[in-house]
Every structure is written in structure tokens, then in C-alpha cells.
Image (cartoon, rainbow, N blue to C red):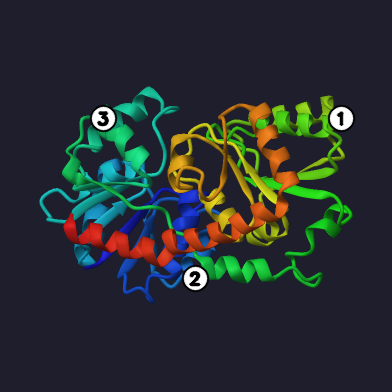
Amino acid sequence: MKIAYLFGSLNRGGTETLLLDVFRNAAHNKLDAIGVYRKSGNLETDFIQSGVTMYKIPVSRNRFTYLVKLRRFFVGNDVTVVHAQQPIDALYARLACLGTGVKIVQTLHGYDFTNKKSEKCMLRHIIKRTDTNIFVSNSQRKYYQQKYSLNPGKQQVVYNGISFDKLNAFAQQTTLSSPMSNLREELNITPDVLLLGTVGNFNSVRNQIMICRFLKELKAKKISFHFVFVGGMLESNPQKYSDCIDFCNQNDLEKNVSFLGSRNDVPAILKQLDAFVYATNHDTFGIAVVEAMAVGIPVFVNDWEVMTEITDSGKYATLYKSNDEVDLLQQFMVFLQNKETYKDKARVAACFVREMYSIEKHIENLKQVYIGS
């Protein structure tokens, strides 16, 4: 059974990072995969070196020509299943594979809350014409199944997977000779300062401004801390980033906060934090949260339905009320008074997520979906 993974671009993002880990572990887990992409990106070299053969088939002005090329490629390479990561690619795959017997699977990585009208029309069309839709959490599947009246038998949940071997390797690279150097020395902060952080690009999914409000409250409590925001500003929505910068400047937080931008040493950064704080508006899974849990540090995340799901109702992380910095502050102050208890909880959480959300388990669950499609 050969699986063709269909991409748009190969730029850095949560979906691309997940699929890159899948590709790097494909051979070891007996997954016969090839990759097909329309546009280059900053992860193109990584994908080419992943061990999975990659093919670039750009979209020309004549969409019909592109569909013909796709059809010839899938048939010529004996593809059994095309796995699309976006509705537009699922639509391309369905049109290209008409009459071939090739199955179409798509993963819905996000919600449709911010989709344009044209995007919603496309989604509504293709979501009922795939052989299987994959969702990354039960709550996400429930949302789509109810909204689009989907056939339950064609909807599957496959939790995202983390390459914990990669996570371990990065986390160990904290020597001064490594690019992943000691974060405290990089920031010039002393060991007695509480080092906190979050990970994620500044987009509509995340609620970094709420974290900024929390930091204002934390400073008012005379707590000595430094907070790092790891994640880049998006050209499509620069206001999210600038709002946080402005808030920190206006509330005398400049010396307490660092905006590190996009980093390739996130696991090493996580390992050095005293606690991880996350705020979401509508994540579908939360890879950054799982990675933070996996390195064994205390995690604070709001009670958005998906986060409640992946933390087992707060058993493996501390949940606070969504968009409520006061409740987060109260929860955090309890942590400061009981650090050892929270560290013990974090160690248990690390064992849980490494069992539940491994890349090996993710690939095995994908293979089962392909067989049943």
C-alpha cells in the first residue's frame, strides 16, 4: 500500500513539522510513503533529506494541466491512497483520481472559524466527498460531524504524534558550544529568576495577549521572573505580535519579557523552563503543550475543550479559565508555594504523553485508517 502525501508549500508550521517527523520515521515503521508538493519553502531541504522521496508538481495557470499531471503521477507510481493536508489539495486529489480507484483521505488540522466564504464553500463540498476525514481530537471531530452532518463511519480521530527521540536529542544539546546554548546565559538572567515561556506563532489560534496581561499581574505580585515568547510574527496578521510588544512596553515589562521569534531549538528551550504557560483561542490539538509536558515541566493551559481532552481533564497539567488572567495568576501562585508537588505531577505527565502521543503510535493509527478507507 503506497501513500502519497499531498502538500501545498513546505514552509515551517505545525502540519509540516508533524509530517516531517512522520517521513523521518516512515521506513522504520513500514510506511510506504511519497511526498508531493506544489510550492517550495524553508523546510524543503529537510523533507528531501527525510528518507521519503519528494516530488514537486507546481500548479500552472491551467488547473486542468495540473490535474492531468497529478493523475499520471498517482497512477504511474501505483498510489493506493492520497492523503491531503488541506481541503484545496483534497479537492485536487479527488478530481485527479476520478475513476482510478485511488482513495482520498484528508486531515483537518484546524477549525473553520476564520475561513473566507470561498474556503467554507470548498470545505463543505470536499468534506463529504473524501473516503475518510481524519481529525486530531475527539472534540474537533464532534464539531465537524455536527456542523456538516457527516457520515460517522467515515470520520476518524488520529492524535498528532511527537518524535520523542528528536525531542530528547535536542533537549540534551545545552552546552555553550552548541547553537542550543544555555538560555539563562543568552538572556543574561541569574539562576534565582523564574524562567517561564510559551511556544507558538502569533496567529488567531493563540491568545498571547492574555499571557501578557497575566505577566502584568505577576509583576504586581513582586515575583522575579523572565518570560520568553517563542514564535514568529505572521505577515498576514502582524497586529497580534505588535499588540503584545506594545502592551509590554506600556506596562514596564520590557526587562521581564523576551520575544525570541522562530527558533529551531524549542526542545532545548523547553527543558530549561521552570514552567510553561499556554493560551489558546481554538487549537485543535496543541503540539507545543504536549512537547512541554513531555520534557517534564509544569504546564499551565486554559480549559479550551481540546486542552481538557489531551490533559485528561487537567490530570496532567494545570487548567485555568479561558481568557482569565486572574484565574491563571491564582493557579500560578499555588504552584509557587508547592513547586515540588507540581514537579512530581509533571514527571507523571511526561510518562503519560510519551505513551499516548508518540510518533510511532501516530503512524500505526494512520496505517489503520488507510487500510479501512
Residue 300, image x and y in percent?
A: 61, 43
Badge 2 local density, few (<14 within 10 Å), some, or many (20+)? few
Residue beneath disc 2: 49
Q: Is residue 139 above or below residue 18?
A: above
Numbered disc in front, either 3 or 2: 3
Give how far apart the Cα atoms at labels 2 and 1 are: 45 Å
Q: What numbered label is drawn on residue 252?
A: 1
Kind of residue sitting beneath label 3: Gln
Kind of residue sitting beneath label 2: Gln
> Left or right: 100 with respect to 197?
left
Instruction: Farthest residue to the bottom: give it.
Output: 28
> Left or right: 4 with respect to 199?
left
- Looking at the image, how many numbered discs can be counted on the residues? 3
72 or 181: nearer the viewer: 181
Q: From the image, which quarter does the C terminus lie in? A: bottom left
Badge 3 local density, few (<14 within 10 Å), some, or many (20+)? few
Give how far apart the Cα atoms at labels 3 and 2 are: 41 Å
Can I make out residue 6 in this image? yes
Residue beneath disc 3: 146
Numbered disc in front, either 2 or 1: 1
Residue 124, image x and y in percent?
A: 26, 30
